Image (cartoon, rainbow, N blue to C red):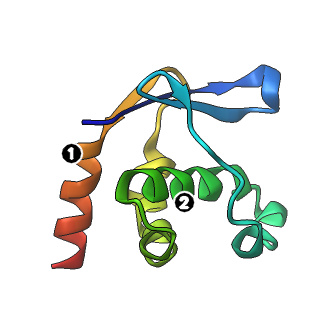
Amino acid sequence: MKVYNGTLDPDKGNRFVVTVDGKPLKRGMFEDLLVDCSKFGIRDAFDLSLSILTDCLGSADAARSLYKAFFWEFTFRLPLGPWELTESEIKMWVKDYLT
């Protein structure tokens, strides 16, 4: 089971720094979706939502269809300090959301 750990890093422009099982989460794969997000100050949060979902579900297509709802349910509510989110929690949310 994957475990996502993160925290807001003021030294990196208040971006979330996230690891998956101790390795950096691959991010920045969705520039096409995030072009207009910068003006609202939510680019990093939407990128984080997309990146976590893609990594967890193994599908960029699934992430694209779920990331906005995931943002409001999880990313928007993340604490500024350290946090943890498990693969099981994410998959349970996806299952509940889709039913």
Q: Is residue 9 above or below residue 64?
A: above
Side (left or right) of 71 relative to 37: left
In this rendering, is residue 79 above or below 33?
Answer: above
Place of residue 80 in the rendered image (x, y in percent of width and height, measured from the top left): 55, 28
Q: Is 25 placed above or below 94 here?
A: above
Answer with left or right where residue 41 lies relative to residue 69. Answer: right
Residue 61 at x, y percent in the picture: 48, 76
For the point 24% across and 71% down, the residue is 97
**For marks 2 and 1 on the same chain, the one whose residue lies earlier in the sequence:** 2
In the rendered view, does 16 fall on the left or right side of 4?
A: right
Q: Element type at marker 2?
A: helix
The x and y percentages for residue 50 are 54, 60
Q: Dot 1 surroundings within 10 Å: few (below 14), some, or many (20 or more)?
A: few
Residue 67, image x, y percentages = 49, 67
Identity, as a three-letter code, of the amino acid under mark 2: Leu
Q: Secondary structure at mark 1?
A: helix
Q: Identity of the amino acid at label 1?
A: Ser
Residue at the disc numbered 2: 50
Residue receiving disc 1: 88
Residue 99's quadrant in the figure? bottom left
Name the residue at 45% across, 78% down.
65
In the displayed structure, does residue 37 sit left or right of residue 45?
right
Q: Is residue 49 above or below residue 31?
A: above
Q: Crowdedness of circle 2 by 10 Å Cα count: few (<14), some, many (20+)?
A: many
Task: Give the spatial CA distance, label 2 vs label 1.
Answer: 17 Å
| Camera-side residue of 56 and 13 | 56
